[in-house]
Amino acid sequence: MSFKNPLINSILSLALIFFFSTEGFSAEPIRISTFQADVTPPIGAPLCGGAVKPVKEIIDPLSARGIIILSDQKPIVLCSVDWVGIGNGGHDEWRESLAKAVGTTVDRVTVNVIHQHDAPSCDFATEKILAEVGISGTMFDVKSCREAMERTAKAAKECLKSAKPITHIGTGVGKVEKVASNRRVLGPDGKVKVIRWSSTKNKEAIDAPEGTVDSYVRLISFWNQETPLVSITHYATHPQSFYGQGGVTFDFVGMAREIREHELPDVKHIHFNGAGGNVTAGKYNNGEPYVRPILAKRLALGMKKAWESTKKQAVTSDDLEWRTVHTVLPVREDLKEKILVSRLHNENANIKSRVRAARDLTFLRRMNSGKGIPLHSLRIGNAYTLYLPGELFIEYQLAAMEMRPDDFVACAAYSDYGPGYIGMEISYTQGGYETGKVSRTAPSVEKVLMSSIKKLLKD
C-alpha cells in the first residue's frame, strides 16, 4: 500500500520496521552465582562482642554464603554470615567490599548475620573508638575479621564466572514443631513476668505458652527448568542452644542447614534469620548438649516441608525489583553523648561496660548524623523478601506478611546490627531485658520502621 503523501509513507515504513524488529522480543533471563567463604575466627579471638569467653576450640567452621542475582539491572548481592552481628562501620565496609567485587553499587548489597552467639561480631566504627582509648581488639579480632571480609569478597568475584540461567523460582512454607517460643512471658498486669532465655530450666518459663512466634520456615528456591540450584530459607528465632564457653559453632541452625545439604547435595543452601529478636528455643531447650541435634532435626524437618511444598513460577528480569529505603531510627532518650564518653574513658570500669558505651556512642552518632540504616526489599514475581536491621521483634515480620496477604513474604533480620533490639512501642512499657535494658531505639521506632516497611512492599 502506498500513499501520495511522502510523510505518511515514511511513518508507515518506520512502523513496519519497529513491528518486525520487536516481534518475538522477550525479557532478558535472570542468572545467578553463589559463593561461600570461611569466616571462622582464630583461637583466642573474642566472641559475641567480648561478652563471652574467647575462642578455645572450633566445633564447627563458620561460613559466609551468598547469591548474586544478575539481570538487565545492576547485580544484587544477598549475603548471610555465621556471626553474631555486623554493625555500623562493619556493615558499611562489608557491603562496600562485596559491591566493588561484583561491580554493583552498595545500595544493592545486603549483609545479614544468623546471630549464633559462639561467633564473632564486627563493627569497625566502634573499634576505632575503642582504639582511641587504648582497648583495641576487645570487641573482636580486627585482623581476622578483615581477612574474612576479603575472602568473602574474593569468593563473590570468582563465582561470577560460573553464573547459571534461572527460568523459575519456587516458594514454599513448612511448619517447625517445638523450636520457637517468645522470650517475653507477660503477667496479668501486662508486664514481663518471666524472661525465657535461649535455654532454661525454669518450670514457669517452660510451662508458659509459646506466645507470639512465626512457626514457619519460608523458602525461596531458584531453578533452571526442572533443575533446582539454590534454596534460601528464613526462620525466626535466636539460633543458639547453649553457648559461652569458647567453642565456636554454627549451632542448631547451622546443623539444620547441614542436614539439608546432605539431603540435597546438588543444591546450594543459604539460611537467613528472621525477626527473632524476642524469640528463642527456651521452652524446648534446657541447655543440655543432647538437645542441640534435636532442635536441628526439628528445624531441618521444617525446611524439608517447605521444600516439598514448593510452587514454581516462571520469571525473567521483568519480574525483578530491588528497593532501598534509608531510615533514621529514633534513639532512646537515656543515650547521651556526654555520659557515654565519660563511661568510655573510665579506666576503672570493666571492659564490657566500656565496649558497651562505645557501641552505644557509635549508634547515637550515626543516627544523629542523619546517615541512617538501609532497609531493602527484593521482589521476584509475587515473592517478596525484606532485609531489615537489628534484633527485630517478630511482630514486624508478622505485620509485613499482613501487608501483602496474597503474596509470598519472607523476612531476613539482623542486617545492620547497630540498633540492637528493636521492639514494638508497647514493649518499651512492659519491661524485660530487650527493651527494658539494652535496646538503643526509642518507643517511636515502631512508627518509623513500619512506615519504611510499607514503602518497601507497596505496589
Image (cartoon, grey):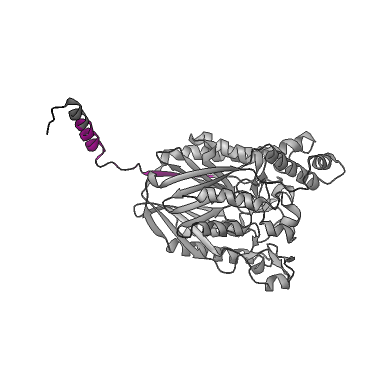
Image point (73%, 71%), residue name: 188
Q: Is residue 25 magenta?
A: yes
Tell me which segment is drawn in magenta: 12-36
Taking depth in this image into account, of 260 and 392 the one nearest to the observer is: 392
Q: Quadrant of residue 254?
A: bottom right
Query: Farthest residue toward the left?
Result: 1
Rendered location of residue 258, percent (x, y): 53, 57
Rendered location of residue 234, percent (x, y): 53, 56
Rendered location of residue 455, percent (x, y): 53, 48
Count how many numbered circles sit on residues in the image: 0
Query: Farthest residue toward the top?
Result: 6
Q: Quadrant of residue 364?
A: top right
Judged left or right of residue 202, residue 343 is: right
Judged left or right of residue 313, residue 121 is: right
Taking depth in this image into account, of 311 and 268 the one nearest to the observer is: 311
Image height of 155 relative to 83, above or below: above
Judged left or right of residue 433, residue 339 is: right
Image point (56%, 65%), residue name: 215
Report if residue 257 is visible in the image: no
Report if residue 172 is visible in the image: yes
Judged left or right of residue 109, residue 92 is: right
Rendered location of residue 245, percent (x, y): 72, 55
Quadrant location, the N terminus? top left
Query: Farthest residue toward the front?
Result: 5
Image point (51%, 55%), residue name: 410
Q: Is residue 167 magenta?
A: no
